[in-house]
């Protein structure tokens, strides 16, 4: 049995898929279709971010990752490698939804572009914590939220810079600091900019993606779409 595993932001780099784009017509056609859809949405050619230049963590760089995932999966399927299952993390969930037929490509890419816009504009920071979620929750306030549960004794918290600074001081005092803070790329999994999350939800409704569709994609009980967009990530140990 075959499963396609589709990652979220992080592994992207300028030049990914360049040789495939030059030499494989299926891959090239998929990239070109994505570029045609995104140009009126972003005002830019995504192929520039793919093959020439993109700032790390920029909306264009993250969109390039989704486009690459889609094009590579399409190329594999065309070659006869058809997945029995699709598993996505964060951005990869949108690619999985598209490949599974829940979203059309022309629906999915504008939704991802909007998501990237408010993630990058949200600001703030994240910090890694060497503690369980139960230990971390009492330290949170309305300016901090649990962004990821990475393991039984490892969490990530997201929030505004000054709130994260104060949390770091407390974590250092308790000897729980696992990783220094960094710019909050996973802000979509926090409480920041919830109004913008809701705006993206409205676009999802326009794209005819229902709450139950999205909940099924997330492998969870149906819940409000805003919650699904910014719900914390939970990594399970198997």
Image: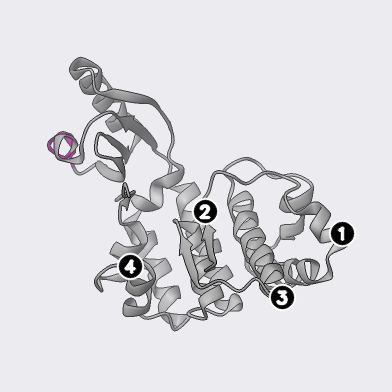
Instruction: Single out the mark in the foreground, 1 or 3.
Output: 3
In the rendered image of this protein, does residue 90 appear above or below residue 167? Answer: below
In the image, what residue occupies the spot 84% across and 70% down?
Answer: 25
Mark sitting earlier along the chain (3/2): 2
Q: Which mark is residue 7?
A: 2
Q: Are marks 1 and 4 in contact (CB under 8 Å)?
A: no
At a point 45% along the width and 74% down the height, the residue shown is 203
Which badge, 1 or 3, comes first in the chain's sequence?
A: 1
| Residue assigned mark 3 | 78
Is residue 28 part of the magenta span, yes or no? no
State the image coordinates of residue 115 (x, y, percent, origin top left). Answer: 48, 60
Say few, some or many: other residues with alpha carbon within 10 Å of mark 3 (under 14 / 14 to 19 / 20 or more).
Answer: few
Mark 3 touching mark 2, by CB under 8 A? no
Residue reaching furthest to the front: 1
Name the residue carrying label 4: 219
Numbered disc 1: secondary structure: helix
Question: Total label count?
Answer: 4
Label pair 3/4, CB-CB below 8 angstroms: no
Q: For the residues carrying marks 3 and 4, which lies nearer the camera in this image?
A: 3
Q: Nearer the viewer, residue 63 or 72?
A: 72
Label 1, residues with CA under 10 Å away: few <14, some 14-19, many ≥20:
few
Let me know if residue 40 appears in the view.
no
Cα separation between marks 3 and 2 = 21 Å
**62 to 217, vertically: above or below:** above
Q: Residue at x 32, y 77 (%)?
A: 211
Side of 222 where 233 appears, left or right: right
List x then y, in percent, for residue 167.
Answer: 24, 27
**Which stretch did the figure color magenta?**
137-141
Q: Residue 67's quadrant in the figure?
A: bottom right
Give the CA distance from mark 3 to mark 4. 27 Å
- Compare marks 4 and 2 and give the one earlier in the sequence: 2
Residue 22, numbered label: 1
């Amino acid at each position: 049995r075959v499963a396609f595993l589709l990652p979220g932001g992080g592994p992207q780099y300028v030049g990914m898929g360049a040789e495939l784009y030059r030499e494989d017509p299926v891959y090239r056609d998929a990239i070109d279709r994505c570029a045609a859809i995104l140009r009126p949405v972003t005002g830019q050619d995504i192929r520039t971010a793919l093959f020439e230049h993109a700032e790390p963590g920029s909306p264009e760089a993250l969109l390039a990752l989704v486009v690459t995932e889609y094009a590579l999966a399409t190329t594999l399927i065309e070659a006869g490698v058809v997945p029995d299952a699709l598993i996505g993390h964060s951005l990869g969930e949108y690619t999985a939804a598209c490949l599974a037929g829940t979203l059309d490509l022309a629906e999915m890419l504008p939704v991802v572009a909007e998501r990237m816009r408010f993630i990058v504009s949200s600001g703030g920071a994240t910090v890694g914590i060497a503690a369980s979620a139960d230990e971390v929750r009492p330290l949170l306030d309305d300016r901090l939220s649990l962004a990821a549960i990475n393991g039984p004794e490892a969490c990530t918290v997201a929030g505004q810079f000054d709130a994260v600074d104060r949390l770091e001081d407390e974590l250092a005092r308790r000897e729980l600091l696992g990783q220094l803070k960094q710019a909050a790329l996973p802000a979509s999994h926090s409480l920041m900019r919830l109004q913008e999350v809701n705006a993206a939800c409205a676009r999802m409704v326009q794209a005819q993606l229902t709450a139950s569709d999205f909940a099924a994609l997330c492998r969870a009980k149906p819940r409000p779409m805003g919650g699904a967009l910014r719900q914390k990530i939970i990594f399970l140990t198997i």
